[in-house]
Image (cartoon, helix red, strand yellow):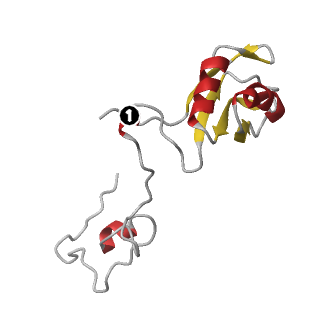
């Protein structure tokens, strides 16, 4: 068994040139994460009655639909929700490996009342023989 002798006194561990840091941690050490606008972010005005309730996204009111059948298409979901108001957008995410629906969808309405009616009516109903759950995608946390 060999042991290695190390002379700790001659090496102080300090470098003559400054250390150059690259990557994600660089901004914290250089003093400030946000350049330019200084961390000013856009917000959406919330009404006093909405505290603890649904939150509006930047473009509209988004519903989260879970329990979507794996072979469902956007048209199947649109047919179920369009009778409650103008559906602005639908996102049905697919599994990359299988190509089937992941089991949820996002449905966006312009109008809050139409979105609330869709929640009340479609929650617990079937789409392609599978019961779906519908709720708000974004909620304001109670203060």
Residue 69 position by quadrant: top right
In percent of width and height, residue 18 lies at 31, 83
Q: Residue visible at 75% across and 27% down?
A: 83
Q: Is residue 51 left or right of residue 87?
A: left
Q: Residues within 10 Å of mark 1 (few under 14, many from 20)?
A: few
Quadrant in the rendering for residue 13: bottom left
- Residue 90's place in the image compared with 33, above or below, is above
The x and y percentages for residue 57 are 54, 45
Which residue position holds label 1? Answer: 49
Task: Residue at 70%, 33% (x, y): give it.
Answer: 85
Quadrant of the rendered image containing residue 127? top right
Q: Is residue 99 visible?
A: no
Left or right, residue 125 beside residue 26: right
Could you tell me which secondary element the residue under label 1 belongs to?
A: helix
Q: Residue at x 73, y 36 (%)?
A: 92
Quick one: which residue is furthest to the left in this view? 9
Q: Position of residue 116 (x, y in %)?
A: 58, 27
Percent of width and height locating residue 139:
46, 35
Viewer-nearest residue: 65 or 86: 86
Compared with residue 109, is residue 65 higher up or lower down, i.e. above or below?
Answer: above
Does residue 18 sit above or below 72 in this rendering? below
Q: Vertically, is 63 above or below 126?
A: below
Residue nearest the viewer, comparing 91 with 4: 91
The quarter of the rendered structure image containing the C terminus is top left
């Amino acid at each position: 068994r060999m042991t290695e002798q190390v002379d700790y006194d001659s090496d102080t561990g300090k470098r003559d040139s400054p250390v150059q840091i690259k990557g994600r941690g660089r901004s914290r050490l250089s003093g400030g994460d946000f350049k330019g606008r200084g961390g000013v972010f856009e917000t959406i005005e919330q009404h006093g009655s909405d505290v603890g309730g649904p939150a509006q996204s930047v473009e509209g009111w988004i519903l989260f639909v879970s329990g979507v059948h794996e072979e469902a298409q956007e048209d199947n979901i649109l047919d179920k929700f369009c009778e409650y108001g103008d559906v602005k957008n639908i996102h049905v995410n697919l599994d990359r490996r299988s190509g089937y629906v992941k089991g949820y969808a996002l449905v966006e309405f312009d109008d809050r009342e139409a979105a609330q009616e869709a929640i009340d009516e479609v929650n617990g109903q079937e789409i392609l023989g599978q019961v779906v759950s519908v709720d708000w995608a974004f909620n304001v946390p109670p203060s």
